Image: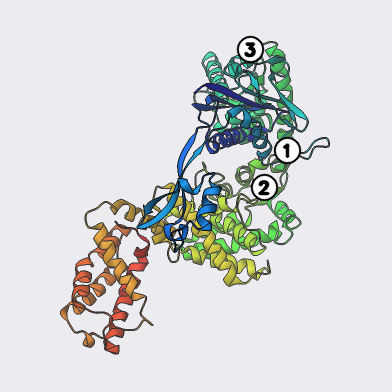
Amino acid sequence: MNKKDLLLEIGLEEMPARFVTNSMKQLSDKVRSWMTDKKISFDEIRAYSSPRRLAVLVTGVSTAQDDINEEAKGPAKKIALNENGEWSKAAIGFTRGQGSSIEDIFFKEINGVEYAHVNKFIKGQETSALLPELEQIVASLTFPKNMRWGTQDLRFVRPIKWLLALFGSELIPFSITGVQTSNRTRGHRFLGEEIELNNPADYEKALLAQYVITNPQERKNAISSQLEKIEEANGWVIPVDEDLLEEVNNLVEYPTALYGQFEEAFLELPEEVLITSMKEHQRYFPVKSKEGRLLPYFVTVRNGGHEHLEKVAKGNEKVLRARLADAAFFYKEDQKTAINASLAKLQSIVYHEEIGTLAQKVDRVRQLANQLSSKLCFNEEDQEITDRAAEISKFDLVSHMVYEFPELQGFMGEKYAIQKGEKEAVARAINEHYMPRNAEDHTPSSNAGALLSIAEKMDTIVASFAIGIIPSGSQDPYALRRQATGVIQTLLAKQWDLKLENLIGLALDAVLNAKIGKKGKADLMDELTSFFKLRVKYLLQGKGVRYDFIDAVLGREIGSVSSLVRRAEVLEANKDAEGFKESIEALSRVINISSKAEEKGEVDSSLFENEYEKALFNKYLSVKKEMENAVSEESAFKLLISMKPEIDQYFEHTMVMAENKDIRSNRLTQMALLAGVILQFANMNEIIVK
């Protein structure tokens, strides 16, 4: 079968950098799925992107769909033939639908039943006749934010400026928003020109000649290589933030790295301020000495060649100088404001119209933090640190610096708190209470910071649920999932024995007492518990724990997060151990039959009819006592499976559902008590054993 290459390029006005990579992957995935669905074979799909284009090159595409030979299954024989042995309407309709006749029917047995079948041949269509459907793929692309332009109805990330679509040297005809496909593409906006392509395989090379590196990984490698050369030439260290590198990579088509400098006087500003000014606002890479000291230099990446780099550097220096001058002014002004004056301003700042002001939020967080510090038996000093940190945790939000650079919330709180005479531990807790800020961030190290982080995030989550802001699908504007994960990670890191349900309850009381929302406590408790269970589930999946073990430990309440995670890990670690299957089956059998117990009571040993009942009861009493003092989840699991011999002997010689009502009730009570101990560890019924 003949093969050709397929090229599709969407030319656009410059896209936001954060959209480029995912959009490229989405286009590639959609083309792959379409070709698979259409049964068009191909060798490889290569995805390309730049700020002005999304493209795919599909190599080795067959010129026609694969022919299909298959057996079509119809009605059962007893339906296909009537009592006289004649073909029924069902049989005739089946063959007509398959483009066959009743003469083509043959019968084939499936699971003991004969069914009518016909052989079906479908001739593959020419690929070129199907390719105009690529229009639907382009139009179906979705983006975090869309726009419309002119009189067009299509909502897209940016206006479409050109469409290149080739199958070999053949043009694929379709149009979108009045833009007709062609065999022409455009080079770099300033350095390149419009060119004609007649062979899809020439795509990368042809555009490179027009100052466009279409392969994003090659572009990123070029940037990294240039940064390394600047490092070596100057004896510097350029810390490369991967997120910043990805963003810069999607801002340029032909990268050239260069460096500039700023006045050393600006180094008196906190390092976080300087780095944030460079990275977040200007997309510059900071420069450090080999000893880790910040230097008065920066590295930027130009979208162009090496001409006139001195002028480009001076222009960037001028822009950064203005930024840093503003930051220096804000920094000095902030130092004139007392903490109490900042706290007073929080009373007039609305956090959310249905939740209240920032000052009210701080009060709830402070109340919750104090309750939790008492539950965790913090010493007097740690309680005082936690309380003070909670009280002033948001004072930096009204500073000039954080207003200009929101990314610095917490960082500036720590700096300013120390400058204004607060204890170092209090200042650190102010910064740490925002942690973990993202998936790569660490959890707070100090007890006060960790507790304040939990309290602040819990208040945000619970208050949001109370007013009906609940994450659904991809919608999570307040990042509640991330904050819930942060709570779980912090509890896990600290190994605190706090029941998550109790934590939710305390936060819920504070929110409801503040008259926030209109939902009832019971409904909110159910919603929040389910929400946190899902977060724990994702955390365990990330640790590689098998799904049925996750279901087993999440079968009842969450309780202590650290204990729950260790129990799941114990099951995962023992799954291949000798006797695991048999032990789980024995414990599951107890849980199964215990469901028939009408109510829990006390076991009456005088009703025992054999020694096996007594042996199991004594083993239960022993295990229950030892479980209360078990030092680890591993030892608790060993205690549970140690009951297997007694359980097996019991069921071999004892009929739980005895005819005598009192004996039956007593045995079911024994099963219920035993199941209660087992379920404290996990619901073994959820575990799949083979």
Please give the name of the residue rendered at 80% of the width and 37% of the height, measured from the top-left corner. Answer: 152
Among the two numbered marks 1 and 2 on one chain, the one whose residue lies closer to the N terminus: 1
Q: What is the three-letter code of the residue carrying label 1?
A: Phe
Give the camera-side residue of 601 and 563: 601
The image position of residue 542, as x and y in percent, is 44, 47
Label at residue 237: none
SS under mark 3: loop
Q: Is residue 618 visible?
A: yes
In the displayed structure image, the side of residue 27 where residue 173 appears, left or right: right
List the single residue furthest toward the top: 307
Give the camera-side residue of 161 and 541: 161
Of the residues tagged 3 and 1, which is closer to the observer? 3
Rate crowding at label 2 as few (under 14), some (14 to 19) or many (20 or more) other CA atoms within 10 Å.
many
Residue that mark 2 sits on: 396
- Compared with residue 248, is residue 358 higher up or lower down, i.e. above or below? below
Rate crowding at label 1 as few (under 14), some (14 to 19) or many (20 or more) other CA atoms within 10 Å.
some
Q: What is the three-letter code of the residue carrying label 3?
A: Ala
Q: Quadrant of residue 198?
A: top right
Gap in Å between the C-alphas at discs 3 and 1?
47 Å
Q: What is the three-letter code of the residue carrying label 2?
A: Asp
Residue that mark 1 sits on: 330
Residue that mark 3 sits on: 209
In the displayed structure image, the side of residue 32 where residue 190 appears, left or right: right
